[in-house]
Image (cartoon, rainbow, N blue to C red):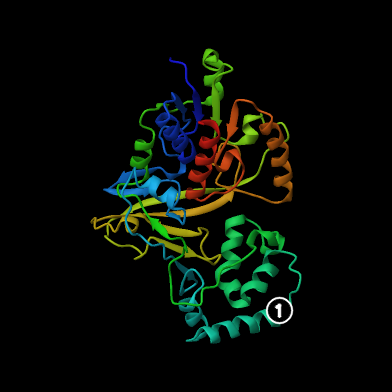
Amino acid sequence: MYKYDFIIVGAGLFGATFANLATKAGKRCLVLEKRPHIAGNIYTEDVEGINVHKYGAHIFHTSNKEVWDYVNTFADFNNYVNSPVAVFHDELYNLPFNMNTFSKLWGVKTPAEAKAKIEEQKKAAGITEPKNLEEQAISLVGTDIYKKLIKEYTEKQWGRPCTELPSFIIKRLPLRFTFNNNYFNDRYQGIPIGGYTKMVEKMLEGSEVLLNTDFFEFRNTHEALFDENTVVIYTGPVDGYYGYTFGKLEYRTLRFESEILDCDNFQGNAVVNYTSHDEKFTRIIEHKHFEFGTQEKTVVTREYPSEWKEGDEPYYPVNNERNNTLYAQYKELADKEENVYFGGRLGVYKYYDMDKVIAEAFALADRLLK
């Protein structure tokens, strides 16, 4: 093997962005990926001509024009707008919380009526210093929205009663007093036509990529590639890098159940949330609607949250006091590294939207490629 300027651990969005910027700067990059495919959790695979989001729905949205222009050099994005629907027992509600939601809940027609109803419920609850997530949510949106659209969904997502979850998890809950079902406020939004995998393939052009490759095993068997001039960009779990010296950071994970249905339209929307305990899953994704598909069949995926254990794929960092304190210990070690840099949600133990991942990779590239 050749010598490399950068050995990048992980072929997800952070690693692919950094590799792309480094190769453009004339650097030689080797990308190591433990999975049998590139693109990390935004990996999409073709099933019945439908680009299935293998690891959960990913909708690209950003207000950062630099990031938007960048991703559009690798793919054409469609005009998909995320407008999820929530099911509570036999009732349907629009998300995010907006005038369509309030009208269905209370029969109100004007923003003033909706605001008055929410304030009335907040006042009746009398919560001045929220001690847990339940009290925090009620103090923000009142009891009706909390009970039907937040409580049981959140308990499924986190595996704990809302009264046992810290209030800081929901510092705010956006209320939109317009008839607007667009979930995001960002200026730019869409799905890459043809799927994310093809986009990441183009980002990795010019880099050497090894799939099914464990970084630690590779380092042990290729010591000559790791000298004082080789820089490692590590996007795996930071606690795993240090052998869980201080203990394991906690995550929530997801289990997916997908099926091909012999119909052209199962639920009429890409994302439908199920907010009661009646169903063990939190939502159903119908993938074809992300790209306005007209295929004769459809593919749907149910998402089941659960506690993470070693061997599972970590999705959502549990950023409570215990884990944040633990991460601070690992970060202290990471900050002392001379030729190892950590990035991505696992590397810095933080949940990132896709545009923020790219922006962080931009920032690291600016530091290392000058």
| Position above or below: 143 against 363 | below
228 left or right of 15 in image: right
Q: In terms of image quadrants, where is residue 187?
A: bottom left
Q: Residues within 10 Å of mark 1 (few under 14, many from 20)?
A: some
Residue that mark 1 sits on: 125
Q: Residue at x 70, y 69 (%)?
A: 135
Pick the front one: 352 or 162 = 352
Residue located farthest toward the front when viewing the structure as drawn: 370
Q: Position of residue 356 (x, y in %)?
A: 51, 48
Asked whether residue 348 is in view, the answer is yes
Asked whether residue 58 is in view, the answer is no
User: Amino acid type of disc 1?
Assistant: Ala
Q: Residue at x 42, y 66 (%)?
A: 83
- Is disc 1 placed on a helix, strand or loop? helix
Q: Position of residue 215 (x, y in %)?
A: 53, 25
Pick the front one: 353 or 37 = 353
| Position above or below: 209 against 154 | above
| Position above or below: 239 against 46 | above
75 left or right of 92 in image: left
Q: Position of residue 37 (x, y in %)?
A: 40, 34
| Position above or below: 83 against 303 | below
Count the numbered circles shown: 1
149 left or right of 25 in image: right
